[in-house]
Amino acid sequence: MANWKASDSTVEPTTEYRRVLDDLVRRIGSGDLAPGEKLPSTVRLAAEYAVSISTIHRVTTTLEDRQLIRGVPGKGRYVR
C-alpha cells in the first residue's frame, strides 16, 4: 500500500465508502431523500455514518458523477 496514489483505479473502495454510498443511493432511490432536498453537510454526514470527511467527499463525488445529486456553489448539494 505504500505506493498507493489517489488516481490509482485498481485500489478497491473501502468498506466504509461502499457502506455510505450504498445507503445514500438507497435513500435517494426510495425517496427518503427526495428530489430537490438538500443533503446534510459533509461534517454532519461524516458524523452520522462515523466516517472521515474524506470518505464523504469521495461518496458525494461519486453521487455527482452518477448524477444523483448536484452541487450548488456556496449552497450545498441537492438530490436530483
Image (tube, rainbow, N blue to C red):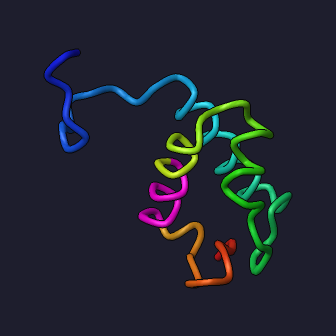
Q: Quadrant of residue 41?
A: bottom right
Residue that appears at 56% across and 76% down? 70
Q: In which quarter of the image is residue 22?
A: top right
- Outermost residue on the right side: it is 32
62 w.r.t. 55: above or below: below
Q: Is residue 62 left or right of residue 29?
A: left
Residue that appears at 79% across and 55% down? 30
Q: Is residue 66 left or right of residue 42?
A: left
Q: Quadrant of the N terminus?
A: top left
Residue that appears at 82% across and 62% down? 31
Locate residue 11, reporting x and y percent.
26, 27
Q: Does the magenta segment cover residue 61?
A: yes
Q: Does the magenta segment cover residue 51?
A: no
32 w.r.t. 74: above or below: above
Per the picture, the main secondary structure of the magenta-coloured stretch is helix
68 w.r.t. 25: above or below: below
Q: In this view, does 61 lie to the left or right of 69?
A: left
Magenta stretch bounds: 59-66
Q: In this view, does 51 lie to the left or right of 36?
A: left
